[in-house]
Structures are given as C-alpha cells and as structure tokens.
Amino acid sequence: MTFTQPAGTTTAHETGAGAAIAAMIRTLVIDTANNAPRSRQRRIGPSEVGNPCTRALAYKTLDWPEVPVADRDPWASIQGTAVHAWMAELFEKRDPKGERYLVEKRVTVRQGYTYDSTIAGSADLYDRASGMVIDWKITGITSLQKYRRHGPGDQYRIQANLYGLGMENAGEKPKRVAIVFLPRHHVLEPYVWVDDYRRDVAEQALARLDAIRELIYKVDPEKNPHLWQLFPTSPQAKCFFCPWHKPHSTDLGEGCPGATQSS
C-alpha cells in the first residue's frame, strides 16, 4: 500500500520543524545538565579521587577554568542520574524505614582542615544485612564486556572503598564493596563485581591526592605555567569526558591536549 499525503500538507522533515524541535530539546537539555548541582561541584568527590590523570586532579584542586565547550554532550550523565534516582526510589519503597538499606547516604570519607580538603559524597546503597557498599554504574555494551573480562579499573575500585571508609566513619561495619554495572542497551543483563572492603585502598588513594596537593603548593603552576608538565596525564585517562580537555593545546594553562598527544 502506498501512503498518499493529503493535499496542502508537508512533512516535518521538509519544513525543518523536526530539526528545529530537536535543536531546541538538545539546547535545553545541555543547558539544564551543565547547570545542575553535580555539574557545578567544585570539591573533589569520592568518584574523582582515583582518577588516573594527575593533571585533571590538579586542575580540579585549583578550581581551574574549564575549557569552554558549549556543546559538551551530557546525555550519558543524564541517563546515569535518572537510573540512580529510579534505583534509589526502588530501595526506599522496599525498606521505607531504612532499617536494612541506606539509600544515597551522605558520608564523610575524610574531614579536612579546609572545605576543599574534605572528601564527602553520597553512597548509592548500603546493605546493613551483608555489610555491603553498592555503587551503580551505567555503561555501554563495549565497556560492559570489558568489565566482565577484566573487572573494574582502579578508579572504580578506589571509589567503592572510599565509600566503604565513609560508611565506617558513619558507624557502620562495611565488609564488602560491590559495583553493579547496568547496561544502557535494552536487555537487563548486569555484571556485578564484588570484593572485600579494603581500608588500605582508600587510604593510599587519599595519600596520593595529598601528594598532588602538596606539589601544587610547592611549584605553584598558576604562577609558573611551564611546571604543569610536572602533573602528568595517563593512558587510562578518560579524556573525552574531561572538562579541561583541549585537543592540540600547547599551553597546559589553557587546557590539556590529552593522553594520546602529550603527557
């Protein structure tokens, strides 16, 4: 059967209405996402402490101006936020009194002497019955396959144990940490990594962060831009998502060219 378009009508594609609506939605979503509280966070959080890129941690410590990218795509982050909210509601309904599950529990990993040296955040889920800290990660097919084969990288492992330390500081008795990798695609086949809670992993990561902070104070890259070279990036850095990534940059004070171009 052939569809016959009524006389005097046009399609959205022909008039450009569809493209205009798509552009409007994209602009609205990006603007809203980039101004969300998490996007404006200036203090280093548990999810960032294990970042393999020393340079990114130095930028964040100094609250360095981000590379202006008006069209930075936040869609993956939005999906993650939405799934986290859905999972939080699920467990809150399952245990409304919070006797077993602590949902989005705010914890202090380490109380610093200043605001920016305090490490705090919200743990996705804590199961008191098993003493398990649980973190949700929303991932694509390729990454999910990689995690199934090799497990999570150091940054995720460190984050899980930092939240374990935060729970310990809150008076709980964490025994294990888990990362639940939930696929973005339509089939719900998660991969769950579980390990013993290791306080030493969290403490070593905090010590590394302190060493970076001490080097910043010692060499002052703000006044001595050439010394940004003392803060290397890493082959494991996720440059695509980095707010200081500036391809082909030759001035590290303006932005980082990325791990594949220069360290």
Image: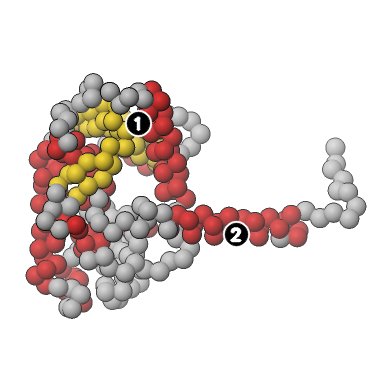
Disc 1: CA contacts within 10 A as few (<14), some (14-19) or many (>=20) = some
Position in image of residue 13 (x %, y %): 72, 56
Q: For residue 261, which quarter of the picture?
A: bottom left
Residue holding disc 1: 191
Q: Is residue 65 above or below residue 161?
A: below
256 or 111, nearer to the observer: 111
The reply, left or right, for residue 259 in relation to residue 113 is right
What's the residue at 45%, 29% (across, down)? Answer: 188
262 or 180, nearer to the observer: 180
Residue holding disc 2: 23
Q: Is residue 157 visible?
A: no
Position in image of residue 263 (x %, y %): 23, 65
The reply, left or right, for residue 144 in relation to residue 177 is right
What's the residue at 28%, 59% (across, down)? Answer: 42
Residue at disc 2, secondary structure: helix
- Foreground mark, 2 or 1, reads 2
Amino acid identity at mark 2: Ala
Number of numbered markers: 2
Identify the mark nearer the N-term, 2 or 1. Answer: 2
Q: For residue 128, which quarter of the picture?
A: top left
Amino acid identity at mark 1: Tyr
74 or 99, nearer to the observer: 99
Position in image of residue 186 (x %, y %): 51, 34
The reply, left or right, for residue 210 in relation to residue 4 is left
Colour option used:
secondary structure
Q: Is residue 169 visible?
A: yes
Position in image of residue 85 (x %, y %): 41, 38
Quote the CA–CA distance across marks 2 and 1.
35 Å
The reply, left or right, for residue 156 in relation to residue 165 is right
What's the residue at 19%, 44% (across, down)? Answer: 108
